[in-house]
Image (cartoon, grey):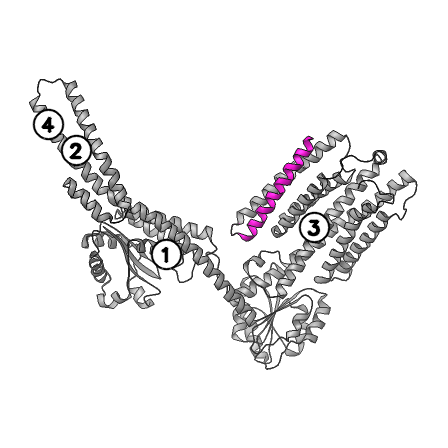
Amino acid sequence: MNPSDVLFVITAVLYSAVCVLYLWSLTGSKLQTGRFASGAATVALAIHTAGIAALGVVLRRPPIANLFESLVFLAWALVLIYLLIARRFRVAALGPFVMSLSVCMIVVASALPKSPSPSLVSELSSRWSIVHVASCLIGYASFTLAFVAAISYMIHERMLKAKRVNVSHMRLPALSVLDSLAYKLVSIGFPMLTLGIITGALWAQSAWSSYWHWDPKETWSFITWLIYATYLHVRIIKGRQGKWPNRLLVIGFIGVLVTFLGVNSLGYGLHRYNW
Amino acid sequence: MHLTVIGLNHKTAPVELREKLSISEEQIPTALSELRAATPVSECLILSTCNRTEVYAYTPSRSDDESIISWMGKFFRIAIEDFKPHLYFHAGHKAVEHLFRVSSGIDSMVIGEAQILGQVKDAYELARDCGVTGAVLNSLFQQAITVGKRARTESEIGRGAFSVGSVAVQIARSIFDDLKGRKVLVVGAGEMAELTIRHLVSSGVSDVAVVNRTFERAEELAGRFCGRAVSFDDLPSALETADIVIASTGASEPVVTRALVAKAMHARRGRPMFFIDIAVPRDVEPQVATLDNVFVYDIDDLQFAVEADAADRQAEVRKVEAIIAEEVGEFITRFKTLQAVPVITAIREKLEGIRAQEFDKLKSKLKHLSEEDLEAIEAATRSIVNKICHQPVIQAREYAVGEDAPAKLETICELFGICPVDEKND
């Protein structure tokens, strides 16, 4: 095993432990458990970072060139953004979701082939490529978290409507917190996706001498971009809050999934290599 | 020897009587020394709070309870027949269990309140500093404090109980998070409404508007919360700005209709609204709840949450009781071992006495022996005594924690011809 693989295994184990700690802090009465969980998550993230860095050193290039590398990077961005926002919002209740998602990504990634196609390496040497891939992935991570917030919103909203009031539901973040959290996340993710699409176009111009091909990945990323643009329009221009905008986030996440994973499995189009 | 607690609390005595039997902290040292002088107790402690007065004592016999009661009568200048019917008596493990229930807060008027643990601790430290506690009460109270802490960390007993008002606040918080700056609209100026507003205001709600059929009543209620009165005709526009609506009119038909709220929600663009309907019959049309982002709780819903919480708390009390049962068992074992101590001391003293006496006799007979030889002989006698002591001492400890302890310890005493005395007294 590579040193980076060992670090990723440790990371996955730690994330699982943190997930259990978060769950425990939600059911138990001790506040310290939650703080301890966040501390442990930070340590796990540091190891995750070290793993990605080690991989980069071994490969002598930014390690975001295939699906394995992208998934590991996506899991990393997910936890990083979560920990950054968890400091400002009281959203420890989302911890178990985020941690189990990240563990799933690392586990799935580890089952994938680890070498990119040779043609890709030359194409990836473009200066736009790194910005393109990294900003798309950070955008996806933000949208995934926004999806987690939206789903939590809907669950909490249902509980309130069903009038099931008890202590454990009081531990879920308030509706207003989840709502503004999702909004903040889209405010990070949307510019990142926009940047990703623009740099992608520039890269396409330098690699294939055309800005836009309407290949499936491009088309779907554009559809996804439109969904989140609609969300922001509804939130900012129309000033709408509540259930409706949150539904858009669920639809938007489906777009992310299709763009990120679905299109590749079709096996055609310009983005058909491993990621 | 008996461990006993005699006392009264909010369950057994009315407040007038509890007042008469309460002792201030300054008086306690005097009370403790008087109690020890007037009765045969070897250790004692007084716990006096506004809800209870209790005397904990370690006494030579059960009948000493009476002397403690008569001392109480004298000390509080109250006729025994006036307070004796209100007293409870617990002895042995029941007394231990009682103290652990008290320190963990499940014997309190407000179950799980935290103050009592501090009061138990203070009472213990006061008595210890007065020098009226010994091995038994010291270890009992130290453990009681541990039990109190365990109860609060290992169960949710310390969490406040729900009331209709606090449930309303909790729901509001799980919709709006911080209530600071949220606007509350009160429809109708009933008394129940006032209680609920009070809860909300103390949680940070600052903007209170009151709508009522009679404008004067609205002004009066609004005045109490630095709010403003709104005329009944302005209800539709008032709904648009309000985040939380408390409805408590005496109207026989719903005042807040679905159409009215739908219109308000349109203007609010989906910002959530929370209706607290505490009127009977209801003021908010049931169909209002079908609107998106609108949450309607009537008095039954709130009451249901209060009762569900009471059931949850009952489960927490059972958790605490399990902790107490475990700790009582532990203490009793320790307590019983303590009872073997006087017997063991008596055996040792008796045998040592015999040894010393015989050795002196021997010394006067064998004058030709050197200092060194005598020392060697003395060491041998000591070691013989220790070896003889060994088995009875172990057996005494075992008897102490087993069944029929007093009778068996008595047998040991008879075998050795000893009569152990307790550390009482001076």
Give the amino acid at mark 4: Asp
Image quadrant where residue B86 sits: bottom left
Position of residue A25 measured from the top left corner of the image (x, y, whole percent)? 55, 50
Mark sitting earlier along the chain (2/4) = 2
Mark sitting earlier along the chain (1/4) = 1
Span colored in magenta: A1-30
Q: Is residue B76 magenta?
A: no
Q: Residues within 10 Å of mark 4 (few under 14, many from 20)?
A: few
* Badge nearest the viewer, 1 or 2: 2
- Marks 1, 4 in one chain: yes
User: Residue beneath label 3, please?
Assistant: A145
- Marks 3, 4 in one chain: no
User: Residue beneath label 2, please?
Assistant: B352
Q: Quadrant of the N terminus of chain A?
A: top right
Task: Tell me which chain the residue with mark 2 is part of.
Answer: B
> In percent of the image, x 39 and y 60: which residue is there?
B108
User: Residue beneath label 4, please?
Assistant: B360
Task: Tell me which chain the residue with mark 1 is part of.
Answer: B
Q: Is residue A136 above or below residue A117?
A: below
Residue A249 vs residue A43: left or right?
Answer: right
* Badge nearest the viewer, 3 or 2: 2
Mark 3 in CB contact with mark 4 (< 8 angstroms): no
Q: Is residue A28 magenta?
A: yes
Residue B101 vs residue B415: left or right?
Answer: right
* Badge nearest the viewer, 1 or 4: 4
Please state which of residues A201 and A88 is positioned toward the viewer in this rendering.
A201
Task: Tell me which chain the residue with mark 4 is part of.
Answer: B
- Marks 3, 2 in one chain: no
> In percent of the image, x 20 and y 56: which residue is there?
B64
